[in-house]
């Protein structure tokens, strides 16, 4: 089993990865970010949607949203969140390496480092090609990642964070000559210790832009935050965007 197929990881660390703070931040971004602005009724694909962190805010703003994820448990969370918000969303359990719906979407998003999960570079390229196929002409893909430059700048000191009556230790490790990154999580709460490992590719802006170019995207650009900031030494995220010609 690959690490991302482990349901216990997503459910056991759900409150950490999918906190109320992140949900609130996503709602603000969807409402205010110039990178996420859409005409009413636009069709959005949320690839690796998890518990609907971005699916629900887009649906609330009138988009027709399809959330795709491999985790049945997280899709159940997304369905419950949609019901609570009183919005309709389409949720599909699928592997992003195999999901494609030709010419269907105006915007595809891959948020919070949900891209680059696969060890084989060709499998990550396949995801990009699937997305290109799934976009309407003129439609855009937006990928939001923890990028290589940011990892290099911020260093990898272990962090200790308080979470809902527990303590979380996070330790990041750069792997394989700066091509991959691993986060080790250790959560102590209610007398229990839980551990998890998350691993993903570590792309520089230039590398990710080259991948989008190779997959066939046009008008590729890059930002350091959701206000559309430049990807410079102050960047908080690596955001790369491309358009289907
Ligand atoms: C870091 S989470 C981000 C979730 C969501 N985008 C967010 O912003 O909260 C990564 C998500 O990718 C999903 N995922 C992992 N491997 C996948 C695959 N092969 N196909 C589809 N989804 C996958 C996980 O189940 C998880 O929901």
Image (spheres, grey):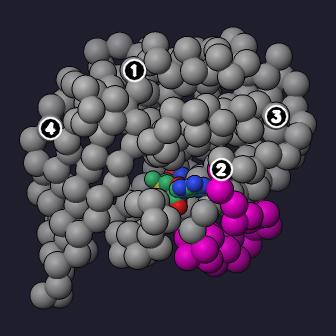
| Residue at mark 2 | 96
Report which residue position mark 4 lands on: 156
Residue 86, compared with residue 110, is above or below; it is below
Decide whether residue 150 is among the magenta residues.
no
Instruction: Answer whether labels 3 and 2 touch (C-beta < 8 Å).
Output: no
Query: Regarding mark 3 in the picture, which secondary structure is present there?
Result: helix
Q: Position of residue 115 (x, y in %)?
A: 52, 41
Q: CA separation, marks 3 and 1?
A: 24 Å
Question: Could you tell me which secondary element the residue under label 2 belongs to?
Answer: loop
Q: Nearer the viewer, residue 1 or 209?
A: 1
Q: Quadrant of the N terminus?
A: bottom left
Q: Which residue in the structure is indicated by mark 1?
A: 204
Q: Which residues are magenta?
A: 72-96
As measured in the structure, the alpha-carbon distance from the residue carrying label 3 to the one carrying label 2 is 13 Å
Q: Residues within 10 Å of mark 4 (few under 14, many from 20)?
A: some
Q: Residue at x 35, y 48 (%)?
A: 199
* Nearer mark to the viewer, of 2 and 4: 2
Please give the label number shown on residue 133.
3
Q: Residue furthest bottom?
A: 191
Is residue 31 shown to the viewer in this render?
no
Q: Earlier in the sequence, mark 3 or mark 4?
A: 3
Which residue is at 90% across, 37% downward? Answer: 103
Residue 43 horizontal side relative to residue 215, left or right: right
Tell me whether circle 2 and circle 4 mark residues in contact (CB < 8 Å).
no
Q: Residue at x 23, y 69 (%)?
A: 195
Is residue 98 toward the left or the right of residue 24 in the image? right
- Marks 3 and 1 close (CB-CB < 8 Å): no
């Amino acid at each position: 089993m690959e690490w991302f197929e482990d349901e216990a990881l997503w459910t056991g660390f759900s409150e950490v990865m999918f906190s109320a703070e992140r949900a609130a931040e996503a709602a603000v971004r969807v409402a205010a970010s110039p990178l996420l602005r859409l005409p009413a009724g636009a069709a959005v694909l949320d690839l690796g949607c998890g518990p609907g962190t971005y699916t629900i805010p887009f649906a609330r703003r009138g988009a027709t949203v399809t959330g795709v994820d491999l985790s049945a448990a997280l899709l159940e969370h997304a369905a419950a969140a949609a019901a609570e918000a009183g919005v309709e969303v389409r949720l599909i359990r699928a592997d992003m390496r195999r999901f494609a719906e030709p010419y269907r979407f105006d915007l595809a998003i891959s948020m919070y480092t949900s891209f680059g999960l696969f060890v084989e570079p060709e499998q990550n390229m396949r995801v990009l090609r699937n997305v290109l196929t799934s976009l309407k002409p003129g439609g855009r893909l937006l990928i939001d990642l923890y990028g290589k430059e940011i990892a290099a700048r911020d260093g990898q000191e272990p962090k200790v964070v308080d979470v809902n009556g527990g303590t979380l230790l996070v330790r990041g490790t750069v792997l394989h000559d700066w091509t991959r990154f691993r986060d080790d999580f250790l959560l102590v709460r209610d007398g229990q210790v839980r551990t998890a490992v998350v691993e993903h590719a570590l792309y520089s802006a230039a590398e990710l832009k080259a991948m989008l170019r190779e997959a066939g995207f046009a008008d590729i650009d890059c930002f350091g935050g959701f206000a559309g900031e430049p990807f410079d030494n102050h960047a908080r995220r690596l955001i790369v965007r491309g358009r289907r010609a």
